[in-house]
Image: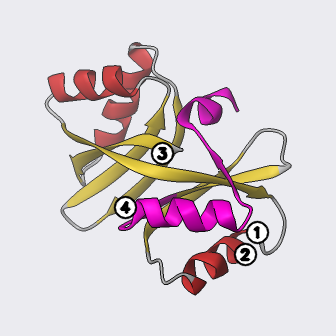
């Protein structure tokens, strides 16, 4: 149920994001989802890729600080209110979202919401109980 995500800490300066994506491309690592959060001095690039271990090792070898965390991927219909239904379910259970990002798969029928929770196991239980579909990293890479 959990999806491995890598987080790369980078200086907030021109070319750093291009450098990371070029390193991944040169090593045949496909980015399936990403999010960038930044401050004035640094950014956090969160990535779901098709080869987590290889990406982590290559980026560390390139001098980047890289961490790995688990996230949940929830598939919902790509229609008005899809995100709201998931968030209402989590709120009702008292589960806080640490961060999230989303993407629409190529069929355009569904969206995939990527979540990080402090209480991951509880979030899994609530989402499954409420009928949501959780997808794996392999399923994300197959989209």
| Label 4 close to label 3 by CB (< 8 Å) | no
- Percent from the top left, x then y, of residue 140? 62, 36
Q: Nearer the viewer, mark 4 or mark 2?
A: 2
Secondary structure beneath label 4 = strand
Of callouts 3 and 2, the N-terminal one: 3
Q: For the C terminus, give its image quadrant.
A: top right
Q: Write the start and end of the magenta stretch as one range.
A: 115-143
Above-or-below relation of 134 to 59: below
Q: Are marks 2 and 1 in contact (CB under 8 Å)?
A: yes
Residue visible at 18% across and 62% down? 41
Q: Nearer the viewer, residue 13 or 141?
A: 141
Q: Nearer the viewer, residue 104 or 16?
A: 104
Check disc 2: other Cα within 10 Å, few if <14, some if 14-19, many if 20+. some
Separation of marks 4 and 3 at Cα, in angstroms: 22 Å
Disc 2 and disc 1: Cα gap in Å? 6 Å
Res. 104 visible in picture:
yes
Q: Position of residue 85 (x, y in %)?
A: 72, 75
Classify 103 as above or below 50. below
> Residue visible at 51% across and 53% down?
72
Please give the label number shown on residue 85.
2
**Quick check: marks 1 and 4 in contact, CB under 8 Å?**
no
**Which quadrant does the N terminus fall into?**
top right
Q: Element at badge 3?
A: strand
Which label was assigned to residue 82?
Answer: 1
Residue indicated by mark 4 = 37
């Amino acid at each position: 149920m959990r999806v491995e995500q890598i987080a790369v800490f980078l200086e907030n300066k021109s070319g750093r994001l291009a450098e990371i994506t070029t390193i991944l491309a040169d090593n045949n690592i496909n980015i399936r989802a990403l999010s960038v959060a930044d401050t004035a001095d640094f950014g956090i690039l969160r990535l779901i890729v098709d080869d987590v271990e290889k990406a982590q090792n290559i980026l560390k070898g390139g001098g980047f600080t890289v961490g790995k965390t688990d996230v949940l991927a929830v598939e919902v219909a790509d229609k008005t209110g899809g995100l709201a239904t998931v968030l209402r379910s989590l709120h009702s259970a008292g589960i806080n979202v640490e961060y999230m990002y989303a993407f629409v798969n190529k069929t355009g029928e569904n969206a995939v919401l990527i979540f990080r929770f402090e209480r991951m196991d509880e979030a899994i239980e609530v989402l499954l109980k409420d009928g949501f579909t959780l997808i794996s990293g392999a399923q994300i890479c197959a989209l």
